[in-house]
Image: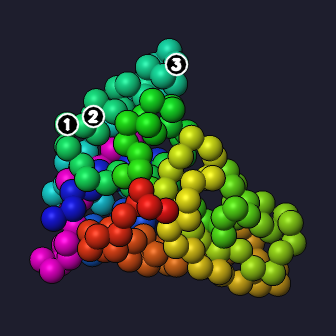
Amino acid sequence: MLNIVVLISGTGSNLRALLEASADAEFPARVVAVGADREADGLAHAEEFGIPTFTVPFSSFASREEWGVALLEQIRVWNPDLVVLSGFMRLLPRTVVDALAPHLINTHPAYLPEFPGAHGVRDALAAGVDETGASIIVVDNGVDQGPVIVQERVPVLPGDTEQELHDRIKPVERRLLVQTVLDIANGLDLASL
């Protein structure tokens, strides 16, 4: 059984998909804890499924490094096999990435390396492209630069708003995340990517 800690910052729609998948007794992975860097609405999903939560507020620390030490301590309590950044909108300090790599993955609402960073959907629209996508990557110390595990294209439709496009990307992200976790549980070696 693959034990997972999921880190979120927002509504947790990807987290919910993972919780629903792992509620199936046949699914070879379990979310053991959900953490956040702020009071995130998505923590309610974990509570609904009876999953423990923790919050390590970035604003409570004098530096990113101090926050990273506290975050890593909380993650290690759960002894996860995999840590999933799912809408986690904070860059992890190098010490945290190095401690967890390569068993640290991230969802991203763009077809990387296109449109990295916090505003992938907005940036795709601003660029006027006719397609973008969703990606699942191994986290490294760059910004959305780690090895791609899986990705899929999503069309940009004429007149799309940022919300409309993001709403079409999210189901793809959720499906790719659940499949990636299943693949890792079944032996996908992240170190080989």
Q: Amino acid at mark 1?
A: Val
Residue 92 visible from this viewpoint = yes
Q: Amino acid at mark 2?
A: Gln
| Position above or below: 192 against 78 | below
Tell me, for residue 13, which label it has, or none.
none
Specify the segment rendered in magenta: 23-40
Describe the element under mark 1 as helix, strand or loop: helix
Residue at point 44% right, 19% down? 66
Q: Spatial distance from mark 3 to mark 1, Cα to Cα?
A: 22 Å
Q: Return the residue found at the far top.
A: 62
Crowdedness of circle 3 by 10 Å Cα count: few (<14), some, many (20+)?
few
Q: Is residue 121 magenta?
A: no
Q: Give the residue pinned by disc 1.
A: 77
Crowdedness of circle 1 by 10 Å Cα count: few (<14), some, many (20+)?
few
| Labels 1 and 2 touching (C-beta < 8 A) | yes
| Labels 2 and 3 touching (C-beta < 8 A) | no
Residue at point 81% right, 81% down? 130
Residue at point 30% right, 60% down? 45
Q: Give the residue pinned by disc 3.
A: 63
Tell me, for residue 74, which label it has, or none.
2
Describe the element under mark 3 as helix, strand or loop: loop
| Nearer the observer, 110 or 146 | 146
Q: Where residue 57 sits: x, y (%)? A: 42, 30
Residue 158, image quadrant: bottom right
Name the side, left or right, on which 162 lies relative to 40. Answer: right
| Nearer the observer, 107 or 151 | 151
Q: Is residue 33 magenta?
A: yes
Crowdedness of circle 2 by 10 Å Cα count: few (<14), some, many (20+)?
some
Q: Where residue 17 sits: x, y (%)? A: 35, 71
